[in-house]
Image (cartoon, rainbow, N blue to C red):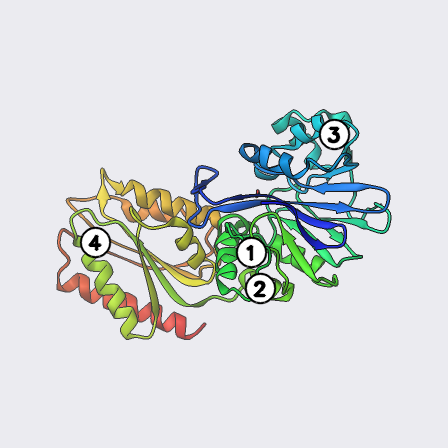
Amino acid sequence: MKRRAIGAGVEWLGAVDWNRRLFDSLIPLPDGTSYNAYLVRGAEKTALLDTVDPPMTEVLFRQLEDVPRIDYLVAHHAEQDHSGTIPAVLRKYPEVQLLCTPKAKPLLVDHLDVPPERILTVEDGQRVDLGGKTLQFLHTPWVHWPETMCTYLPEDQVLFSCDFFGSHLATSELYAGEDPYVLQAAKRYYAEIMMPFRKIVAKNIEKVRPLAMKYIAPSHGPIYDRPHEIIAAYEEWVSDRVTNLALIAYVSMHGSTEMMVNYLLSALAERGVRVQKYELTTTDIGKLAMDLVDAATLVVGTPTVHGGPHPTVFAATNLANALRPKLKYAAIIGSYGWGGKAPEQIAQLIPNLQVELLGTVLCKGLPRQDAFAALDTLAEQIAQKHAAL
Ligand code: FEO
């Protein structure tokens, strides 16, 4: 893809990674992703905002072939998908000065071996004049690491937000327009990397909301040409509000736990509770994370394996704990062969979740009438809690 103009002297560049399917060796990318960089040219100086993931270095360098001089390279974030090509850009442009937050400097030195003498740190609110174009830096910690910042370009009313508001979405479209799928991709992205820092993200939204914005230009996914929509979506996601949604995340080895899951699902639906069922050995963990953004209840279903929960349930529960969703209620159900401590172990795995544990329903082998009666009681409890939300 060639450079694309956003406005006079403001261009998108970077790489669309259509084929990538996993990020951080953890996050599924069903739609690929992009690494967006931006070129801002004033009357006197030129700035490059962010770079690309190192395997895409040649893509970026082809786009820069007719750019003889860059004065400033802005590193919004030290993670390698944006900063990994910084050392190569510093070598190509020996005059360039790298601008970042004070917290980013040691990260760039430690992770990328950037020579510290090439780095100039910028304070929150500091401005750099390019000649008719002003870069105003806004420290926005924890979107996604502690060192992150955004850049505001007041002359063109563009907020360059890096990971903040981003989406893992490979597309030929420069702008999000009215495509509702972009908001879904942004929600998935928020769930996977921003949700653990929800309260701090809320403060960062408050910080950028007053800016006059024609565009929000993130470093993943398309540019928002209707910025109020992604800001409104983020405000909902970071709020304390949950919806009438119960998630049942489970594994079943021989069908007994699945029977319980299906019975509970039906009992909840009959009582007006919306339910989403996730079989954890096959599910897209990113989709589960998306639903954790606003679900009220999580039910964990597990068989007992060597005295504890199924390892896949263990891993998913551990991940849910790390993501710190705003869940209100939880429950544990499952079947065991001859004994075990699966519920106790699962309860210990979720210290970050501020949930009320509504109950545990366990049965030995196949569920029978007493287990189904207990699941009806649990469904009634969940429905009453949801009705009172
Ligand atoms: Fe897109 Fe946190 O890097």
153 vs 25, nearest the viewer: 153
- Distance, label 2 to label 3, CA atoms, is 35 Å
- Distance, label 4 to label 3, CA atoms, is 61 Å
Residue 257's mark?
A: 4
* Residue type at tag 2: Gly
1 vs 95, nearest the viewer: 1
* Residue type at tag 3: Tyr
- Where does the image place residue 237, in percent across and percent down from the top left? 53, 61
Is the C-beta of the residue carrying label 2 under 8 Å from the nearest atom of ligand 1? no
- Callout 1 secondary element: loop
> Which sits earlier in the primary sequence, circle 4 or circle 2?
2
Horizontally, is 33 left or right of 152 in the view? left
Badge 4 crowding class, 10 Å Cα cut-off, few under 14, some 14 to 19, many 20 or more, is: many
* Residue type at tag 4: Thr
- Where does the image place residue 106, in percent across and percent down from the top left? 68, 30
- Where does the image place residue 280, in percent across and percent down from the top left? 31, 49
Most distant residue in the front direction = 66
- Distance, label 1 to label 4, CA atoms, is 44 Å
> Which sits earlier in the primary sequence, circle 1 or circle 3?
3
Residue 173's mark?
A: 1
Horizontally, is 362 left or right of 140 in the view? left
Q: Nearer the viewer, mark 2 or mark 1?
A: 1
Tell me if I can see residue 140 in this picture.
Answer: no
* The C terminus, quarter of image: bottom left
Residue at the image position 48 percent from the left and 60 percent from the top:
184
